[in-house]
Amino acid sequence: MRKNKIGQTVRNIKIDCNSHIESIRKRMEVIPGITIDNFGLSAHLGKKFSPGCKACKRNKWTVVFIGRACNCKCYFCPQPYNKPAFGSTDDTNGIILTSTTKEYYLFLLMKLKNAAAAKNLEAIGYSGGEPFLYMDRIKHYAKEIMDIKSGLYQYIYTNGIAVTKDSVKELRDVGIEEVRFNLAATDFSDGVVKKMVYVRKIVPFLTIEVPSLRDTCLKIKKNLHKFIDIGVDQINLCEVNINQHNNLYFKNDPCYHVYPFSLKEVKEGSISRTTLIEQSPVWSRHITYDVMEMAAKEDWPITINDCSWLNHIKPTWVSL
């Protein structure tokens, strides 16, 4: 193996990016009712669709990593396995740009407000670490954004462990409109799934967002009746992202590499850059389409979204 310019391990078992995209597009073509987005870089199936995902596909979305501490240790996580303890001096989001945390948060909040006012931004997701460990920070951000009456759509990611009825109500009251549960973090725990029952009654939109792992299709099928009864609006299936933090678990898997590209290259199907941005196992996105085919065949009342890495790496980015 060798390393690229930013120190990521480049895997020897490499699949051509263009041929992989073509194999996914062929699967898209046979799914009835599918909506193909971004020249085949992504797709979704279903009538209800999160405004956060709509904004992402329009390149008007961003995410704030509110803190690095987490109460789960997931083997597939692309963040460092040994995360800082909550409240420790190392407990930052890793991108402090000024001399103190307080100055940084005020600076970023100002940029978010400016982007919203300029209509460059339509949605913001709060991630981590585990965001529900940082209730005060998120409430501060969300209320400030809500108070400028920008119409910005705000939502939060979580593994669900720290979620409570009161915490979700507090977030709703400061403008959070959607909660996204990564059920893979707790192996689709019954306890976390039960929490979605009351979350669905509190916020307007409820999403399950999980990586497309080898057992994801089976886990979703096993729990589908629960998700339907709860009223889950959408399931986001994300490609597994492989880097130096989790590559031990995927070292024998054929991968395709994602590079910077232009919109012209996407249209012509000629992505041919050399600087690695992301890498994913070839099977991961095919798991997404296994689920999507099953949803189409059985007419699930839940939207299925292909949240591919190609969908996120766009020719331009949100200007903050």
Image (cartoon, rainbow, N blue to C red):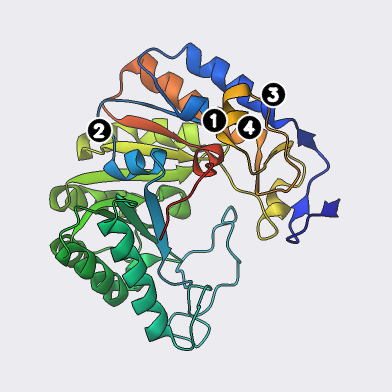
Q: Position of residue 268 (x, y in %)?
A: 62, 22
Residue in the image at 79% along x and 46% along y: 11
Q: Nearest to the eye among marks 2 and 3: give it.
A: 3
Residue in the image at 29% along x and 51% along y: 119
Q: Secondary structure at mark 2?
A: helix
Is residue 138 placed above or below 78 in the rendered structure? Answer: below
Q: Neighbour class for label 2 at 10 Å: few (<14), some, many (≥20)?
A: few
Determine the CA span between mark 1 and mark 4. Answer: 6 Å
Q: Nearer the viewer, residue 54 or 77?
A: 54
Do callouts 3 and 4 mark residues in contact (Cβ within 8 Å)?
Answer: no
Q: Residue type at mark 1?
A: Ile
Q: Nearer the viewer, residue 22 or 206?
A: 22
Q: Earlier in the sequence, mark 3 or mark 4?
A: 3
Q: Nearest to the eye among marks 1 and 2: give it.
A: 1
Q: Is residue 128 visible?
A: yes
Q: Nearest to the eye among marks 4 and 2: give it.
A: 4
Q: Earlier in the sequence, mark 2 or mark 3?
A: 3
Q: Can you identify the residue that label 2 sits on? A: 228
Q: Can you identify the residue that label 1 sits on? A: 287
Q: Residue type at mark 3?
A: Ser
Quarter of the image holding residue 254?
A: top right
Q: Secondary structure at mark 4?
A: helix
Q: Nearer the viewer, residue 248 or 256?
A: 256
Q: Secondary structure at mark 3?
A: helix
Q: Position of residue 61 (x, y in %)?
A: 38, 50
Q: Residue type at mark 4?
A: Trp
Q: Can you identify the residue that label 4 sits on? A: 283
Q: Residue type at mark 2?
A: Ile
Do callouts 2 and 3 mark residues in contact (Cβ within 8 Å)?
Answer: no
